[in-house]
Amino acid sequence: MSKRTFPKEFLWGTSTAAHQVEGNLTNDWTAWEEVNAARLAREATRHFATACPVWPEFEAEATDPANYLSGSAVEHWDRFEQDVTLMRQLHLSAYRFSVEWSRVESREGQFDQAALDRYRTWVTALQSSGIEPFVTLWHWTLPTWLTERGGWESAQTVEYFRRFVDRVVGVMGHDVRYWLTLNEPNVYAGCSYLTGTWPPQKRSLLAHERVVSNLLAAHRAAYAAIKNRYPDAQVGIAHHVTYLDTNGRPWNKILKRAADWLWNWRYLDLIRDHLDFIGVNHYGRNRIDRGFNRNPNRRVSDLGWELYPPSIYGALIETWQRYRKPLYITEHGLADRNDRDRAWFITESLKYVRRAIEEGSDVRGYFHWSLLDNFEWDKGFWPRFGLIEVDRKTQARRIRRSAQVYAAIAQSGRLAREDDPRLQVNVPQARSEP
Ligand code: BGC
């Protein structure tokens, strides 16, 4: 295998999550958006103006409360077939989407067969296009009846989740091979129960620990429920893995060990016997130098997140060395409205993925976040993560140039040479040091 070529079975995909793309939902997040949109709009300039390199282009949008209401999102629910056609045009071989609990069980114990059937048609449409579905069973949103009963703070939610999963798998399990139980329990628990930025906006270590423990119990229950019906199904979790990067000084190494355990490993350690593979969601590093977040930020995304391609190598190698399970990169991407860094970031990062494979880690697929521009949680619509640009007024889709670069990689299974003209036009100029 040449240095630029990926294994033949390597999957090339994209990821989305129901709440961010489907539209017209009623769940704990939509309720929270109604109450908080005006506040988020007021706070936008203070939070993002210094981090976002193209803030003036966003300011009007980000200071408008409408930006913070998921509303019709990008109508993926109704436009799924059209979006599969786009995936085909991009030569993708896998797609990760989530099933929205509030759609399937909008009232306790009452399951909506039509919604489940619609999701089943998605699976069929993907498969008849040669695209492998990866189905996430929970990507952060809850039906409102469940929040009223305490959400993930309540141990009873574990049983509710098991029952929901059993229903979904009963309908779709025959055709779906890959399941992701939960998306990023560490990010969810942190933002919803420690920093208090996301619903239900609590700041309590005790509640946080309860939520983590219930989420991991829910993972184990879902794993068992799926295996019970389909023993050959492959069940994993989508875990947010940050690469904690140090200069090797002893004190920094101690900080790294502690942070690695708290953020990356303690979750996976507790479920390692219930994982057929690990989904690695990776967005960057946290550089430690007598403190955290000492990143030089030479290049940043529109959200101010550092673009540092080698970090994916660190995340993959460390996850592989600790667990020795197959890995899929279930998310990796950037907010880049003008598409100036995306092609470069994908291509450079994939070189490091390739290197991790060459050095023995069993990485089996890459899913770019995201297929479409979408609703970025408490930041709303202004950050643009899509390989495909969406005009929310008309819902028109337009394939970005970076998507064409990614499509060429997906089609050939190899990285383009540096002098590939499609890549050159997207190579950004280095920004000045902060
Ligand atoms: C989440 C996505 C989110 C993305 C970009 C991930 O942590 O799973 O839902 O849109 O990051 O912020």
Image (tube, helix red, strand yellow):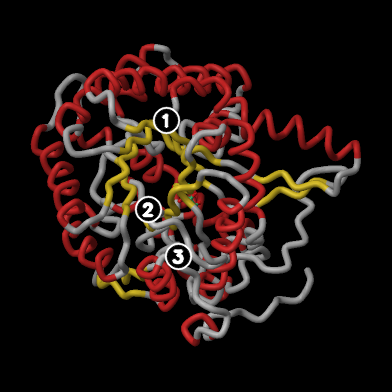
- x and y percentages locating residue 391 in the rendered image: 32, 71
Q: Which residue is mark 3?
A: 384
* Disc on the earlier residue, 2 or 3: 2
Q: Is residue 14 visible?
A: no
Report the side of 12 relative to 415 (left or right): left
Q: Residue furthest front?
A: 1
* Disc on the earlier residue, 2 or 1: 2
Task: Check residue 276 in the rendering and tell me which mark sits there, or answer none.
Answer: 1
Name the residue nearer the viewer: 359 or 228. Answer: 359
Report the side of 301 relative to 137 (left or right): right
* Disc on the earlier residue, 3 or 1: 1
**Where 139 falls versus 85 (above or below)?**
above
Corner quadrant of residue 190? top right
Disc 2 residue type (three-letter): Glu
Looking at the image, how many numbered discs can be counted on the residues? 3
Give the Cα separation between the discs numbered 2 and 3: 30 Å
The structure residue drawn at horizontal position 30% and vertical position 29%, both measured from the top left corner, is 144
Mark 3 Cα-neighbour bin, 10 Å: few <14, some 14–19, many ≥20: many
Q: Is residue 393 visible?
A: yes
Task: Check residue 104 in the rendering and tell me which mark sits there, or answer none.
Answer: none
Corner quadrant of residue 220? top left
Q: Is mark 1 within 8 Å of ligand 1?
A: no
Q: Which residue is mark 2?
A: 9
Q: Which numbered disc, 3 or 1, marks the residue closer to the eye?
A: 1
